[in-house]
């Protein structure tokens, strides 16, 4: 049985279908979501991942999804990302994309989180 891995409140889907199911379930008028597209081999992701974990524990009002692009590679994920840069953060609120950012500048990510409040 495939189950989502949960680390602090971060959802880490193991497949495209797990990602799509979780995202569609929580992408509602009342919920904010941050999706973090990463790759284990990427140096910027290695720096950002522990910080992303910390952010998730500080913001209980936001759903955090961490997608390992190597484990969940698919045309659907690529289309969702609309970007080949890794790491990429995409923020959603009220079912709409609020902001997209490729990089690991924590100040920018904090500003994105503030927009979701």
Image (spheres, helix red, strand yellow):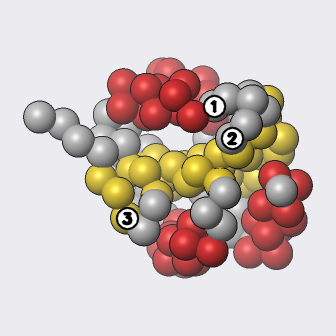
Inter-mark Cα distance, 2 to 1? 6 Å
Label 3: which residue? Answer: 7
**Residue beneath the point at 63% across and 74% down:** 58
Q: Is 31 placed left or right of 48 in the picture?
A: right
* Disc ID at residue 11: none
Give SS at disc 3: strand
The quadrant of the image that shows the C terminus is: bottom right
Residue contact between numbered discs 2 and 3, judged by CB atoms under 8 Å: no
Name the image quarter holding residue 81.
top right
Instruction: From the image, tell me which residue sits under label 1.
Output: 27
Residue for point 85% across, 62% down: 114
Q: Mark 3: few, some, or many residues within 10 Å (few <14, many ≥20)?
A: few
Q: Mark 1 or mark 3: which comes first in sequence?
A: 3
Real-space Cα separation, disc 1 to disc 3, in angstroms: 20 Å
Instruction: Kindly tell me whether residue 78 is visible in this rendering.
Output: no
Q: Is residue 103 above or below residue 66?
A: below
Marks 2 and 3, the one that precedes in the sequence:
3
Tell me what residue is drawn at x 11 percent, y 34 percent: 1
Name the residue furthest left: 1
According to the picture, the residue beneath numbered tag 2 turns out to be 31
Q: Nearer the viewer, residue 36 or 62?
A: 62
The x, y position of residue 70, in whole percent, is 37, 45
Image position, residue 19 (x, y; %): 43, 34
Residue 31: percent from the left, percent from the top? 68, 41
């Amino acid at each position: 049985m495939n189950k989502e891995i949960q680390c602090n409140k971060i959802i880490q889907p193991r497949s495209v279908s797990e990602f799509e199911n979780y995202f569609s379930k929580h992408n509602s008028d009342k919920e904010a979501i941050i999706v973090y597209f990463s790759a284990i081999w990427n140096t910027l992701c290695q720096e950002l991942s522990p910080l992303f974990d910390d952010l998730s524990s500080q913001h209980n009002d936001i759903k955090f999804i961490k997608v390992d692009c190597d484990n969940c590679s698919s045309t659907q994920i690529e289309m969702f990302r609309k970007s080949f840069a890794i790491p990429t953060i995409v923020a959603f609120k009220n079912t709409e994309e609020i902001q997209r950012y490729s990089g690991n500048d924590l100040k920018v990510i904090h500003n994105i989180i503030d927009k979701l409040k």
